Amino acid sequence: MSSLRHHLLWILVALLLAVSTSAWSADYPARPITLVVPYGAGGTTDISARQLAKLAEPLLGQPVVVENRPGGGGVNAMRAVSRADADGYTLIATTSSPTFVTPALRRVGYDPLQDFLPLLNYSGPYHGVLVSADSPYHSLDALLAATQDSKRLSYATAGALSGARLAFTQLARETGAQLQHVPFNGASGATAALLGQHVDIALVPAYRDLVKDGRLRLLAVLDDQPDPDFPEVPTLEQAGYDIQFPSIVALMLPRGVAEERVETLRRAFTEAAASPAFAKVMKKLNQPVRVLPGPALAAVIEKNLHAYQQLAEALKR
Amino acid sequence: MLLDAFHALLDVWVLIAALCGVAIGIVIGAIPGLGPTLAIALLIPVTFTLSPIPAIILLLGVYQGAIFGGSISAILLNVPGTPSSAATALDGHPMARQGRAGEALRIALYASVFGNVFSCLVLILLAQPLASLALDFGPAQMTALMTFALAIIVLFGGGSILDAALMTLVGVAAGIVGLDPIEGLPRFTFGSFAAEDGLALIPVLIGLFAMSEVLLQAFAGRQQGPAERGIDAVSSQTSSPRAVGWLSLWKMRVTLLISSAIGTFVGILPGIGSTVPAFVSYGFARSRSRHGARFGHGEPEGVAAPEAANNAVTGGALVPMLALGIPGDAVTAVILGAFMLQGLTPGPFLFQQHGVEVYAIFEALILLSIPCILLGLAMFRGAVHVIRIQPRHLFPIIAMLAIFGAFSVNNSLFDVAVMLGAGVVGFVLRRAGFPLPPLLIGLILGPPLEQSLRQALLTSSGSATIFVHSPIVMGLVVVTLLCVLGAAYQRYRAARRERAA
């Protein structure tokens, strides 16, 4: 009995040594990596992040565990990750709203530029300017011109603090158009309100089938590039307005992770995001694959954060 | 098409998926705090390896099973497993206390199945036209509908109308905490980031109903054994299969039909969920019944009405999700993702491109009733014995499940604090004799009512004519007024009869 206990003790000591040496050694990653998803399980952000994690696992040689932290429109998870250890074992798969929209509008408890290192952008659903198919407006110009003479048009968005709202607020300020914002709980509510003609315009993603079915008309996209499904539809910038709402779905790290660890993660996740297997899943989800390296992503975030901060200041006055 | 679809169901994986889905659903539903959304989200990776039909059936089985499963704990323990089964506890638990637990469970099961089949038939026959009906409900119409629902809860919920109105207002006031739905400004958050999401429904529900039950037991004085609590779960009378015959179901046929129709209709509309139709159907059944006074004291119809309604919501909620690709709530949003991953993109082209799969899924939804009944009856045999567990063993477990359930919603300790706070509030209110359901309904309907009202006024530039111009709104206003008058007349007659006697 006692010899058995002895054996167990030795095995335990050996195991502990093995664990601690691997933790001390330079080879990274030595333990599972946590990928935080700031939304609930089962949504498109969650499903795509899980797929990306699965594809990155063999490249990293360690499991990538997805952890859902919903709440606060993604802000809660961002705040938690900004305070996590910068050891390269915690990442976040985040979107536009908690990265450069909400922080421009109110106190969130983190600085998106100082506290995070953008690693890679891998998706971002195109947001469209949509009207009902039997609406009289066939172009953005016609729509804006119609609002000049005392007529107000209402536009639905996915929520009070959405980036689409900010883009349209700025559009209204620059053109003098009379546009009334009506926020809904999520893009699906806004789409339904447009389909039922309770509002005149909706600024929502995931419009492809409804446009192809002839229920809705796409006048413009808010992104900085045209939607590949509708290459003939202009972006706001192509239509002559210096405004954009670029949609991002990106991996970010807390600032301060050692450069070689960042490089390991960057290589693995970039390869996973560019893989045909990932493209296949994203096609099924009706989501684009948009790979953008860290520095370019950082520029997008910084540019729009500043633009929205200025707009928020102007709105307060 | 329907026959092709049926052939697609003749597959052993379909059977396995249906059995597993329903079984998992019932168990998840019965545990307070764990709901179908969580279970379905966790099962989505499992469905990657399955072909489309079994994959979707597995998830829809969980959805159906969970809504029914919530009634088991509601009836046996007075602790609703899901928000939608809170109404079932009103009469289900008194029945269990009278030794009729088996009967109550069977009624809940059969009413659930009835509601399911009803709403699935509606889904098969009328998905497209109903989806466009749902679109007619904009902010103004939703405002009128939610006002109507609040009126029904207050007028016909049973007990004092003043108490119910007070509790509803408390619920609505509690719903103000969090970010303003239109401007996004924080209200009553006291600088706390966690409070910006408001008081989440699941923690409040667990606190109000489960934690307060624990506190009531803890302060009930001397420990009572099950026999002394007047519960005899497995008496010979209740375990006989004749206890709920076809006759008693036939007697409830009108209630079952009305409740299922309410559930299906509300399910089609976005954002209301299954709790409100359950309570509204309960109110309707009570106001229609000749034995209205028996409601709340163990009336079988009071179990059947909410169960038929909350299960009918499942079919209704799938209507806009499948026909337009627009999910109405968290569960259908998760199911939408699962459909897309299987290559069945919901929306206008779903029925054209994947007709066989879609109709196979519809038929399976109806056929899921069979495993639901079989597994339900089998589980009752074990479940009724839960009542025999000594309170000193049972209630600590419920307390732990309550904490775990509250935490699991958002992985947040704030939710646990909300749950405990709601538990103390619920305990005090129950001790004082106030009804809790109107508080729950006020909390559920308050925020969307505020949002709809303000959206309606935003689209009309602040003019109230938006309500007058809509026939749907005027119809709902008239029905609401008729209900108020009806309730007043009922009271007047009851008072006169009392005076005459």
Image (cartoon, grey):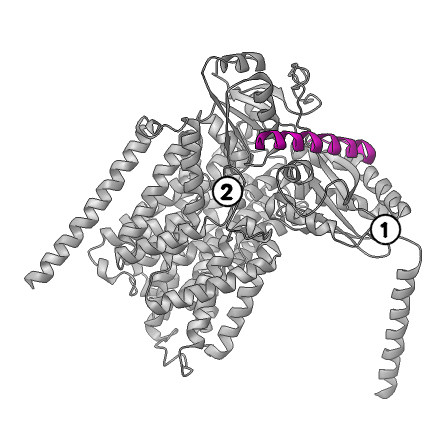
Pick the residue in front: B223 or B27. Answer: B223
Q: Is residue B483 above or below residue A313?
A: below
Indicate the amino acid at tag 1.
Answer: Gly
Indicate the amino acid at tag 2.
Answer: Asp
x and y percent of residue A271 in the render? Answer: 83, 38
x and y percent of residue B120 in the render? Answer: 43, 42
Q: Is residue A4 above or below residue A187?
A: below
Residue of label 1: A61
x and y percent of residue B258 in the render? Answer: 31, 45
Q: Chain of mark 2?
A: B
Residue pushed farthest right?
A: A26
Q: Is residue B180 visible?
A: yes
x and y percent of residue B292 in the render? Answer: 23, 57
- State the separation of the CA atoms marked 1 and 2: 45 Å
Q: Is residue B371 left or right of residue B248?
A: right
Task: Give residue B224's quadrant in the image.
Answer: bottom left
Secondary structure beneath disc 1? loop
Q: Is residue A250 magenta?
A: no
User: In the rendered structure, which segment of residues is drawn in magenta?
Assistant: A288-317
Mark identifier at residue A30? none
Residue of label 2: B180
Q: Residue at x 19, y 45 (%)?
A: B485
Main SS of residues in magenta: helix
Q: Residue at x 41, y 68 (%)?
A: B427
